[in-house]
Amino acid sequence: MQVLKTPESAFDKITDFSYTPHYIQVTDTISSEITMAYYQCGPKDGHTVLLMHGEPTWAYLYRKMMPILADAGFNVVVPDLIGFGRSDKPVRKEDYSYARHFIWLKDWFTQVVKGPTTLFCQDWGGLLGLRLVADMPDQFASVMVSNTGLPTGDHTPSEAFTKWRRFSQDVPVFPTSSIIQNATVTPLDDVTLAAYDAPFPDENYKAGARMFPLLVPTTPDSAEAQANRDAWGKLKQFDKPFMTAFGDSDPVTKGGDKIFQKLVPGCEGMPHTVIENGGHFIQEDQGELLAKLLINFIQQTSN
């Protein structure tokens, strides 16, 4: 598999994300090893909080939440998915699949994350992170989801997602930072926009970013549609604390919180909330508030 590695110099001008990257070799069943990056902050012996990003962001998305969680005594672990951030970027679109992303993530998780864990996930962080929860429920003490889902293709995608999917394939130059800006309520400054563009020096690095929208199951026979149905079967038995905190300004995932609340037993009695002025990339709009909600959620529900 041919991969590109973003030069470290591409990240030199980022001044508000000083965390040291760590690297792990992961593999799937058919390819050679590939390098996945992640970041850690807070006491390593604290309760682990796993923060999962989506498309087309990277761990930088969590820079507002990480120090607050670390100061509260949590072991905060944030990976860059393959194809994003400092992780390796396969060149061919064909090298990306939903199943392969999950295998890579599970390999990383098994190597890096120890002990009971709380997952916070958004966007593709949920499509992958919730599969981890379903596959290894004993590893997770609690879950908080925001602006995400676990689609099975049994329901028609929203018009907003359909437009986004078409745009992602037709646009000649994939405008990473503009995509993020257009899905936030908060105006982002030039430094922030440049940080989101940093992992992708040119279009050759963006195969993964372009592929993610195509990997979402949109029909009942889509790849991984059945795997997601199976995962839902297990989530319907997940009775540990499970909280929703969706934004009020995300047309792509609007209403998805109600699905979790209806189907996941662990949602019962939890302090679900709809966050005002929260766009799709809610970590940008309301990162500090999300961190505080997450801290309270863990503290109030831990045994």
Image (spheres, grey):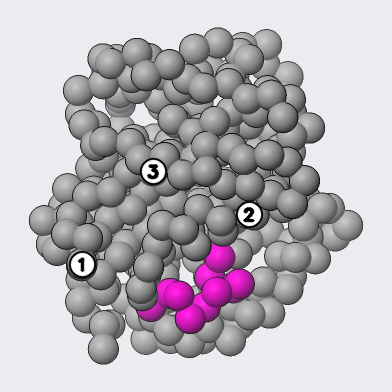
Residue 159: give x, y in percent of width and height: 69, 42
Please tell me the numbered disc located at residue 38: 3
| 204 is higher (above) or lower (below) than 130 | above
Under tag 3, what secondary structure?
A: strand
Q: Say few, some or many: other residues with alpha carbon within 10 Å of mark 1 (under 14 / 14 to 19 / 20 or more).
A: few
Dot 3, crowdedness within 10 Å: few (<14), some or many (≥20)?
A: many
Q: Can you give x and y, in whole percent of width and height, for residue 233 in the image?
A: 68, 79
Query: Where does the magenta region start and end?
Result: 132-142
Query: Residue 82: horizontal and vertical position, in percent?
Result: 56, 38
Answer left or right for 76 relative to 31: left
Give the dominant element type of the magenta stretch: helix, strand or loop: helix
What amino acid is labelled 3 in the image?
Answer: Tyr
Q: Amino acid at mark 2?
A: Phe
* Residue tagged 1: 45
Q: Which mark is residue 102?
A: 2
Residue drawn at x 49%, y 40% as measured from the top left: 36
The disc, 1 or 2, on the residue closer to the chain's N-terminal end is 1
Relative depth, front residue between 5 and 264:
5
- Quick check: 187 left or right of 133? left
Query: Which residue is drawn at the image coordinates 48% and 81% (left, top)?
Result: 138
Could you say which is closer to the camera, residue 199 or residue 248? 199
